[in-house]
Image (cartoon, grey):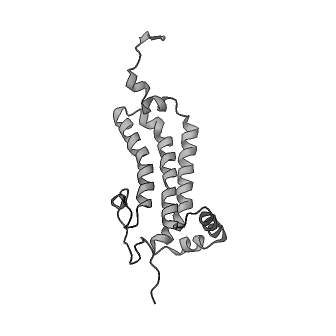
Amino acid sequence: MARTRIGVVPRPPVWQCLSLVNFLAHHPGRRWSVASAALAGVWALFLLPPQLVEWGDAPAWAEALNDSPFYRGVDALRETLGLHDAYVASGSAIALSVVLVWWATGPSLRWLGWSGHVFSWVLLSLAPVTVLSYASCKETSPLHALWGAFAPRAEIGADGQPGRQPATA
């Protein structure tokens, strides 16, 4: 037992020492939380133009950005890394934003007690579910039932791919 100015503070149960709550007790300060949340937003905005184009019916500004030399360079880099499906690559990359939001909200969720603890785990589990969902978009995928688990389902075209379909002659 530790002594404080108020008196004796009982030792927490073992399950609390190994839990996410204990991790969040050593979470970075507010500046890091704000920076993490801002980075999550910037990353999501960076991924937005390619996603809108892949989904089809993208606004003109998204088409213009996606056709810019910068995004063409990003596509070339993605291809050289062996990630040939732009929908899966950019969709799965949003998991980084989810993790950054989880990191940013940790201190606030800690104050909510057990409900914050549960929500924190749900938020963190959303990252791998998002990756699995995007990776399972093809109907031949064994985990295809997970596709769209985080959002409403998109239409599947004749080629079995979501989003924009190739023009037919």
Across and down, in percent, residue 169 comes to: 46, 90
Across and down, in percent, residue 53 comes to: 50, 71
Q: Nearer the viewer, residue 159 or 3?
A: 159
Q: Nearer the viewer, residue 139 or 163?
A: 139
Across and down, in percent, residue 33 comes to: 54, 40
Across and down, in percent, residue 18 comes to: 43, 28
* Residue drawn at x 58%, y 39% as measured from the top left: 31
Residue 15 as seen in the image, left or right of residue 166: left
* Residue drawn at x 59%, y 70% as measured from the top left: 65
Q: Is residue 87 visible?
A: yes
* For residue 124, above or below residue 88: above
Residue 53 as seen in the image, left or right of residue 117: right
Q: Nearer the viewer, residue 51 or 161?
A: 161
Residue 149 as seen in the image, left or right of residue 33: left
* For residue 86, above or below residue 43: below
* For residue 160, above or below residue 24: below
Q: Quadrant of the N terminus?
A: top left
